Image (cartoon, rainbow, N blue to C red):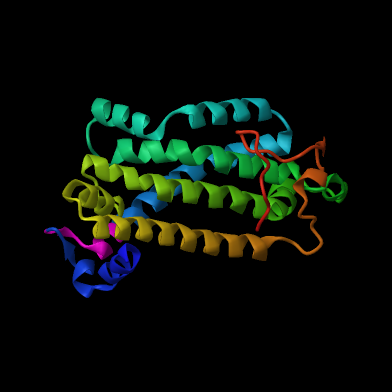
Amino acid sequence: MLFLQAIQWILTPANWQTVNFGPGIGGELVAHLWLTFLSTLVAAVIAVPIGLAIGHTGRGRGGAILIGNVVRAFPTLGLLSILLLVLGLGLPPVVLVFVLLGIPPLLAGAYAGVESVDKQAIDGARAVGMSEWQVLTKVEVPLALPLLLGGLRSAVLQIIATVTLVSNYGSDSLGQFIISGAATKDYVQMTAGAILVTVLALLADAVLASAQRITTPRGVLRGAGSRTTARGRRPLTAPSGAPISEGS
């Protein structure tokens, strides 16, 4: 019954305009998407070039795993609280937390994707006279794209879920409905907020999963653990040590 009431609350046109004298679903959704997009973009600009360099040269993988594990060890809510206390309320400290959250999966997707490229393809590219930059951009990156998108997919889902927390500090996001609902004991609104965040995450995952499947070259093995990589045979792992999937 509560679930159905929450669905009805979401489908009520007035709630898309304003809720409790604040932004409605439409405004909070735009704010949630903006924070997600901006944080993912900054994280990708930082992590992807570093990951591609690590994968291409084979150097620095251990350091990347260590950094990823250290970043993942920080409790997101605690880190967000500390930064907001030190730097004050505003967009930069909020985005910084989500950038730190997005870097490990993007970094892992980039270097694991390049490492997954078959050594024979790389040797063939060098044999026809390609420079190292051409090998990276014309051979390794296109073939690494599925795993790179896998890292993007993981980063986006983590950021979408965590952006909900900023409503604890007065920033706009879909989490505002959860926070307000809990404060006023309006469990219908609270459930509606949880449904909205879940649906947004599922839609984003579906879009990125489709992109991942489309960019997977025909004939490429999907078993990451059995792939012959440019650096030898070894499973592709994220900084946390978990295997990275090429698609599902």
On the image, the x and y values in percent for residue 196 come to 36, 60
On the image, the x and y values in percent for residue 105 come to 56, 42
Task: Identify which residue is drawn at 33% across, 69% down.
Answer: 4
Task: Identify which residue is drawn at 66% across, 63% down.
Answer: 213
In the rendered image, the quadrant that contains the C terminus is bottom right
Q: Is residue 138 magenta?
A: no
180 w.r.t. 235: above or below: below
Point out the stretch of residues depicted in magenta. Answer: 21-30
Q: Nearer the viewer, residue 66 or 133?
A: 66
Q: Report if residue 248 is visible in the image.
A: yes
In the rendered image, the quadrant that contains the N terminus is bottom left
Q: Nearer the viewer, residue 153 or 188?
A: 188
238 w.r.t. 20: above or below: above
Q: Report if residue 46 is visible in the image.
A: no
Task: Identify which residue is drawn at 52% across, 26% down.
Answer: 70
Question: On the rendered structure, is 166 left or right of 223?
Answer: left
